[in-house]
Structures are given as structure tokens and as C-alpha cells.
């Protein structure tokens, strides 16, 4: 079967059609006296109608099928509205969108693979520790007064570490789901900062780190979810203590920023290398892996901070210099 699927075949078909129509018209009108202009007009009309239906039943039907497949379009396009330039642009846009979807899909696949690897790695350490301590106690250590209490404390520490990881994972999952609704209300950010500092007083005193609040804001009420912003403060201040230097300082600044309020939490701790800043808010990413595990970090705290602030339509920013300290900042809408 002859298929019209190339420009060459289409040109052959049109040429044959024109010649056949011309020969047919000459044969029909050879013994009749008609004006030349009438013959030309009639010839044009016949050619136009034939070419119109030929294009409509070949190329247009295929283009219409492409539109249906690309846009899941129900029904038929109007042939009179067909514009080849528009079709070309639509197909190019569709191809670019599909290419972008494929890139995002590959990124998601890589992210999922890394995430599963990180989860298994983070849980494996405390599980193996628990297994080792339990086996030692079962092998007779339970009756050894020198090691039984020490190993039970270590067991408890490993269990708490697993609980912290699972709870942080639940928090992130909750924040990413539609179930996590931000309950906006007006509350005092200064009062919240004082509450968080009070809760970290013992932990800070162990490192001899001073917690200081500097208020330079004219209005202290902000709009947000108080419980979630409390978690943001807790995670940032906890990190400033964990990665701080003995005798150091953690400072919370409240500043006016046009019609909003700027919060900065800074420390003079170990700082963060510039190469790590881009990945700092990824799940399980650690700047200093050995130190993080020694102090019990899960590697999820900053990821939680990022998700909470994104839920408030805000972003978390960081600037840091190695061995000099770090400053985390974010903005909240002022309340009444």
C-alpha cells in the first residue's frame, strides 16, 4: 500500500493529481468553446478542493493524533485553525517538558537511593551497638558489676539515638505531607526565644557557652506556627551548642526588616567549610561525621528547619567561616 509519509511521496502524488485533473478537463472540454479565464478558475477550484482534502485526510489526521497523545486532548481540532508554526512550538514545548520531567525523575531516583542508604547506615550503627552490648551481657557480663551498669547505660544511649532518628524522620514525613498544616497565630518571638534558651541552659552550661538575646526590633509579635517555630529555634540553638567551642557564645538577634522581622542565630563555634554550605540542609548530611555521632546528632535537624520555614513561605540562610562561627537567619511576618 502506498503511504504518503515523506515530502517526496507527497510531491509525486500532487504532481500526478494535477496532471490527471488537467488531462481530464482537457478531454471533457476539448470540443467546447469556453473562455480561458473560466477554465483557469475551474482548474484552480478543483485542484484546491483535492489538495485540501488530501492534506486534511493525511497530515492533519496525524497532527491531530499527536495533539491527542501529547495533551490527552479529547475531541478533534478544527482544521481551519491549524497553524504549522504553532504545532512545531507545541511539540518543542512538550519535548522540553518531558525532558525536564526525566531529569527530575532521575534526581528523585538518586535522592531516594541516597536517602535509603543514609537511613540504613544511620540505623545500623546503634543496632550493631545494641547487639554487641546485649550479647556481652548474655555471655555473663550481666553478673559482672564492673560492666553491667556501664553497658546498660550504653544500651540506653543507643536506643535513644534510634528513637531520635525515627522521630525526626516522622517529623519530616509529617511536614512534607498535606496533613501538616501551618496554624498561623500571633505570638511574641522574644518570649519564645527566652523559653528555648531556658530549656538549653543546662546543656549550654556544660560547654560553658553563653546564650544571649539581642533585641533591636520595634514589634516583637510575629505570625506563624508557634510550636514549629519553637522547633526551629531548638534545632538551631542545639546545633550552636553541639558544634560550639567551650566558653563560646550563642547569640539570638531580633531585627526589624521593613514590615517583617529578621531572626539571626549566630555562634563563634567551629564554623562550616564553604564546600559544605550547599548541602547543609540535606537529610543526614553531616559536616563533621565523627563529631556528629559522638554528640548524638541525627543529621536531620537542619532539614526539618528548612521544611518548617518553607511551610511559612520563607527560607533559611546561612553564612559561615571555618573556625570562626556560623550565622543562620530567617524572616517572619510581623503580627499584631
Image (cartoon, grey):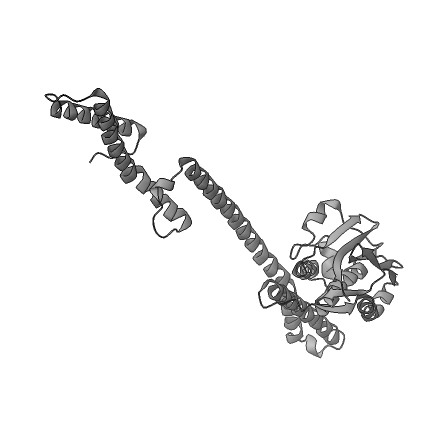
Residue 314 placement, left or right of 37: right
Give the image location of residue 284, x and y in percent.
Answer: 65, 57
Residue 253 placement, left or right of 289: right
User: Which residue is at a point 49% across and 45% down the rendered structure image?
Assistant: 97
Residue extending farthest left: 31
- Which quadrant: the N terminus? top left
Q: Which image quadrant is residue 131 in? A: bottom right
Give the image location of residue 229, x and y in percent.
Answer: 73, 65
Give the image location of residue 64, x and y in percent.
Answer: 35, 44
Give the image location of residue 319, x and y in percent.
Answer: 77, 49
User: Which residue is at a point 85% across and 61% down the rendered structure image?
Assistant: 218
Using the image, determine if residue 209 lies above or below residue 60.
Answer: below
User: Foreground residue, 79 or 248?
Assistant: 79
- Label count reads 0
Q: Which image quadrant is residue 282 in? A: bottom right
Using the image, determine if residue 78 lies above or below residue 128.
Answer: above
Residue 40 placement, left or right of 234: left
Residue 5 placement, left or right of 205: left
Q: Which image quadrant is residue 124 in? A: bottom right
Residue 51 visible in rendering: yes
Amino acid at each position: 500500500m502506498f503511504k504518503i509519509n515523506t515530502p517526496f511521496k507527497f510531491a509525486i502524488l500532487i504532481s500526478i493529481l494535477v496532471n490527471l485533473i488537467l488531462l481530464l478537463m482537457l478531454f471533457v472540454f476539448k470540443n467546447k468553446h469556453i473562455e480561458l479565464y473560466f477554465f483557469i478558475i475551474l482548474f484552480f477550484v478543483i485542484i484546491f478542493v483535492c489538495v485540501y482534502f488530501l492534506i486534511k485526510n493525511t497530515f492533519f489526521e496525524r497532527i491531530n493524533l499527536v495533539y491527542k497523545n501529547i495533551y490527552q486532548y479529547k475531541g478533534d481540532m478544527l482544521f481551519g485553525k491549524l497553524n504549522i508554526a504553532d504545532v512545531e512550538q507545541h511539540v518543542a514545548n512538550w519535548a522540553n517538558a518531558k525532558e525536564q520531567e526525566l531529569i527530575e525523575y532521575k534526581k528523585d531516583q538518586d535522592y531516594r537511593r541516597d536517602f535509603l542508604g543514609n537511613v540504613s547506615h544511620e540505623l545500623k550503627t546503634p543496632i550493631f551497638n545494641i547487639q554487641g552490648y546485649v550479647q556481652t551481657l548474655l555471655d555473663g557480663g550481666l553478673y559482672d558489676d564492673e560492666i553491667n551498669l556501664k553497658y546498660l547505660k550504653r544500651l540506653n544511649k543507643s536506643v535513644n539515638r534510634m528513637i531520635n532518628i525515627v522521630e525526626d524522620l516522622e517529623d519530616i514525613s509529617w511536614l512534607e505531607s498535606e496533613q501538616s498544616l501551618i496554624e498561623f497565630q500571633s505570638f511574641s518571638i522574644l518570649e519564645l526565644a527566652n523559653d528555648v534558651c531556658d530549656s538549653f541552659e543546662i546543656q549550654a552550661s556544660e560547654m560553658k557557652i553563653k546564650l544571649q538575646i539581642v533585641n533591636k526590633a520595634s514589634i516583637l509579635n510575629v505570625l506563624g506556627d508557634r510550636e514549629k517555630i519553637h522547633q526551629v529555634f531548638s534545632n538551631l540553638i542545639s546545633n550552636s551548642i553541639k558544634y560550639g567551642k567551650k566558653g563560646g557564645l550563642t547569640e539570638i538577634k531580633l531585627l526589624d526588616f521593613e514590615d517583617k522581622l529578621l531572626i539571626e542565630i549566630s555562634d563563634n563555634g567551629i564554623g562550616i567549610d564553604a564546600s559544605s554550605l550547599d548541602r547543609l540542609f540535606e537529610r543526614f548530611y553531616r559536616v563533621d561525621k565523627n563529631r556528629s555521632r559522638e554528640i548524638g546528632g541525627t543529621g536531620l535537624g537542619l532539614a526539618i528547619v528548612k521544611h518548617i520555614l518553607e511551610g511559612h513561605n520563607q527560607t533559611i540562610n546561612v553564612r559561615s567561616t571555618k573556625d570562626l562561627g556560623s550565622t543562620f537567619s530567617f524572616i517572619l511576618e510581623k503580627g499584631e
